[in-house]
Image: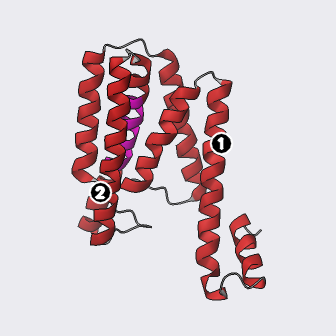
Amino acid sequence: MKSIGKRLSERYVLNGIIESRFSDAYAYIFDYMFNFILYNLSLLTLGLLFHHPIAVTIYIITGSLRAITGGYHCKTRISCYILSYTVFSIYLSTIATIPMISAYVLIPIYIICWILILVVSPVDTPNKVFSKSAKKTARKKTYIIFFFNSIFTILSLLLHWNRDLIFIDLSLIICATGLYIGYISNIRRHHES
């Protein structure tokens, strides 16, 4: 069975919009965009169903950081779906059960997470090896996200939105964990070869 991206790229080739030699690349891009939109819409729907739309929005925004910084990637699409929804389910259940935490604890966690992320990012994956210029671009994008994330965090701190600080910290912990698992996997892969 052909994917939506494959069917769409074939249609674009037939209509003369793209050259046939680029069909596979466009199929990949279309499938990626479709999966990205579907995944984020499903997360937002689950967030609304479980009454955590702000937490899910923060999770999705922080997830964009993962797309830039790289890190661990599953070998198959199915295992990626399973892992992604499992991590999201753990996130949702954690935010639903975690008690209020003092900002004096949350801010150091925030700082530690960002230091950990900034130290190793971007991390290559088997599917995406960064060139020197791509690493430089990814690093700039990471700093931009860090800047805006910090503004929101400071705003949350000043307005005493400790729940939002918890959502941010948990999202960053998930991002940093995936980044370091990918980093360690790369070290092992290079050591074995």
- Which residue is at a point 58% across and 57% down the rendered structure image? 77
Query: What number is the disc on residue 139?
Result: 2
Image quadrant where one finds the N terminus: bottom right
- Which residue is at a point 25% across and 52% down the rendered structure image? 120
Return the x and y of residue 111 as percentages of the image width and height.
24, 33
Check the image and report above or below for 125 versus 172.
Answer: below
Check the image and report above or below for 128 versus 171.
Answer: below
Return the x and y of residue 79 as percentages of the image width and height.
56, 52
Dot 2 alpha-carbon crowd within 10 angstroms: few under 14, some 14 to 19, many 20 or more:
some
Question: How far separated are the C-alphas under marks 1 and 2?
Answer: 27 Å
Dot 1 alpha-carbon crowd within 10 angstroms: few under 14, some 14 to 19, many 20 or more:
few
The tally of labels here is 2
Whether residue 131 appears in magenta in the rendering, the answer is: no
Q: Could you tell me the amino acid type at mark 1?
A: Leu
Whether residue 174 appears in magenta in the rendering, the answer is: yes
Secondary structure at numbered mark 2? helix
Residue 85 appears in view: yes
The magenta region covers 168-180
Return the x and y of residue 26 as percentages of the image width and height.
62, 74
Q: Main secondary structure of the magenta part?
A: helix
Secondary structure at numbered mark 1? helix
- Which residue is at a point 74% across and 71% down the rendered structure image? 8
Return the x and y of residue 133 as percentages of the image width and height.
29, 71
Disc 1 designates what residue? Answer: 41
Query: What number is the disc on residue 32?
Result: none
Whether residue 88 sits left or right of residue 176 in the image: it is right
Check the image and report above or below for 100 versus 174.
Answer: above
Residue 193 appears in view: no
Image quadrant where one finds the C terminus: bottom left
Name which quarter of the figure residue 134 lies in: bottom left
Q: Could you tell me the amino acid type at mark 2?
A: Arg
Q: Are marks 1 and 2 in contact (CB under 8 Å)?
A: no
